[in-house]
Image (cartoon, rainbow, N blue to C red):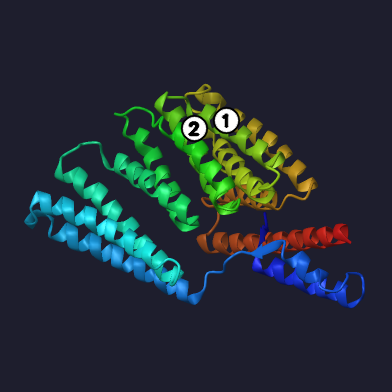
Amino acid sequence: MKRKISNSEYRVLEKEFIFLEHTGQLQTNQARKLLAEYVPTERLSFVRVLLIIGAVLIGVGILSFIAGNWHQIPKLAKFLLLFFGTASFYASGYKIEDDYPRTSRSLYYIGVFAFGAGIFLISQMFNLGEGVYADFFMWGLGILPLAYYLKDKLIFASASLFFIIYGFNVLNGTVEVPYLLLLIIPLLFWMNEKRMGHSRGLFIANSILTLLFLFNLFIYFDVHGVLISCTFFALGLFLAFYPFGRYQLPSEWLGSAVYGIAGLYLTFPSTWIDFVSEDNTGIAAIIFTLIFAVKLLFFLKIGSLPAVLIVCTLIFRFYADLSYNFMPKSLFFIVGGLILIGFGFWFEKTRRGTVISDEHDEK
């Protein structure tokens, strides 16, 4: 199986292999054979962007037309219009798939919009009463087979987004936990590995969906906010410190975002209300802040770039908290701007040092 790499990485390999072949370190035509083991990922061309935008506009137009004339159309005509409309776009896309692949893909996208319109409008027509969250779940579930067939990351990402929206179902407080996600989440990870070429972006989307399901599970069972934050703080640290091999960089950044957000939330004394006595909320926040700072210093020591951003955010959070009410507003913003510029310089310097270190290690 050929390995997928970015276009820039492919060009670098091409130059290096040709150089090695010209200097005699590789045999004649060996550069071409080695390059054949790699395939550059498809770039988002201007034509494809136009077709995607056109498909979105047509899809929105279809939704607007049907919704605007919905009450004037007989029920049977509504159902047939939505069914055959979706089927015709899919069939048209399939028919011209070999000759005009980009245009074919845009027709599939319009079909995805038409299918979504059918889900929402038929639910309204028959008063199914399942709610908008369930409609999004059915929309995502209905386009997953198409994403699998086309190996289309955009459709797959849309399905993941719809499942994420469905995950907020529990926030209504009147429905059960969306346990169907327990079946969907492993399927999404499997599809990314087997059909989507190990996409980092889709891995992040699937991971966010997993974390969201866990968060909603805690909300449903009325777990205290401090315990939820501490759990996500620990999960984020685990992701950042033990990133998945193939997805090391996105795991590190996602984990850092999770433990950073949870950690910042726990530095506020008000977070600890109802978990400790009111007199001890400040002490609890200070103790956690010290633990948080030690963890950040450890990540800074091992050269974690996300940790630099979290440290900057943490410092600015305390600066704003301590200074806003005691400084003239103009001075507050000036000093805050200088701090942010200093943080930007620190981050750029740290990033450049990391890149130079990586290049040195490669040599």
User: In the rendering, at what x and y percent does residue 260 appear?
Assistant: 60, 43
Residue drawn 55% across and 62% down? 333
Numbered mark located on residue 103 in the image: none
Mark 1: secondary structure: helix
The residue singled out by tag 1 in the image is 231
Q: Nearer the viewer, residue 275 or 33?
A: 33
Q: Is residue 75 left or right of residue 247?
A: left
Answer few, some or many: residues within 10 Å of disc 1's Cα (few below 14, many 20 plus, some between 14 and 19): some
User: In the rendering, at what x and y percent does residue 24 appear?
Assistant: 92, 74
User: In the rendering, at what x and y percent does residue 130 appear?
Assistant: 25, 36
> Do the CB atoms of the residues marked 1 and 2 lie less than 8 Å apart?
yes
Numbered mark located on residue 214 in the image: 2
Answer few, some or many: residues within 10 Å of disc 2's Cα (few below 14, many 20 plus, some between 14 and 19): some
Residue drawn 52% across and 73% down? 45
| Amino acid type of the residue that numbered disc 2 sits on in the rendered structure | Leu
Q: Is residue 150 left or right of residue 55?
A: right
User: In the rendering, at what x and y percent does residue 268 appear?
Assistant: 54, 37
Q: Quadrant of the C terminus?
A: bottom right
